[in-house]
Image (spheres, grey):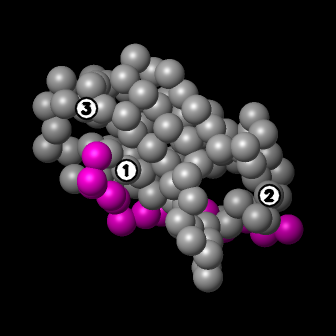
Amino acid sequence: RLVESGGGLVQAGGSLKLSCKVSGSILSVFSGNAIGWYRQAPGKQRQWVAITAPGGIANYADFVEGRFTISRDNIKRTVYLQLNNLRAEDTAVYFCNMQDLWGQGTQVTVSS
């Protein structure tokens, strides 16, 4: 299963580092899969934020604009999302995804 953590309340311009721990996964399964971060704001559809492919190649949604960094530690079975220069519109529940598995999400709230 996937467990997100690291969310919280931060002022605009601040930073947070989210973690997504994939438990119950053997190394070859984890390292061989793409893992993505998504977010869902109140009243809005879930949207894709970033993805890390096997080997560490990363891609980001246009709205990220260089503010977020996704990374993965295959030994720890963990994917990270570093959020910098946060804006009020980044407020959402952030989820990680691997294949058809989703975590429960972690709340990020940015005050303006």
At 20% from the left and 45% from the top, the residue drawn is 23
Q: Please say if 102 is above or below 22.
A: below
The type of residue carrying mark 2 is: Arg
Query: Which is in the foreground here, disc 3 or disc 2?
Result: 3
Q: Residues within 10 Å of mark 2 (few under 14, many from 20)?
A: some
At 40% from the left and 17% from the top, the residue drawn is 55
> Which region shows up in magenta?
99-112
Question: Going from the N terminus, do you reach mark 1 or mark 2 first?
Answer: 2
The type of residue carrying mark 1 is: Asn
Q: Residues within 10 Å of mark 3 (few under 14, many from 20)?
A: many
Q: Is residue 14 magenta-colored?
A: no
Q: Is residue 51 left or right of residue 34?
A: right
Image quadrant occupied by the C terminus = bottom right
Q: Return the residue at label 3.
A: 30
Q: Return the residue at label 2.
A: 87
Inspect this view and state whether residue 35 appears: yes
Q: Return the residue at label 1.
A: 97
At 56% from the left and 71% from the top, the residue drawn is 45
How far, Cα to Cα, is label 1 from label 2?
23 Å
Image location (x, y in percent) of residue 94: 52, 59
Q: Residues within 10 Å of mark 1 (few under 14, many from 20)?
A: some
Image location (x, y in percent) of residue 26: 14, 31
Q: Secondary structure at mark 3?
A: helix
Whether tag 1 and tag 2 are in contact, CB under 8 A, the answer is no
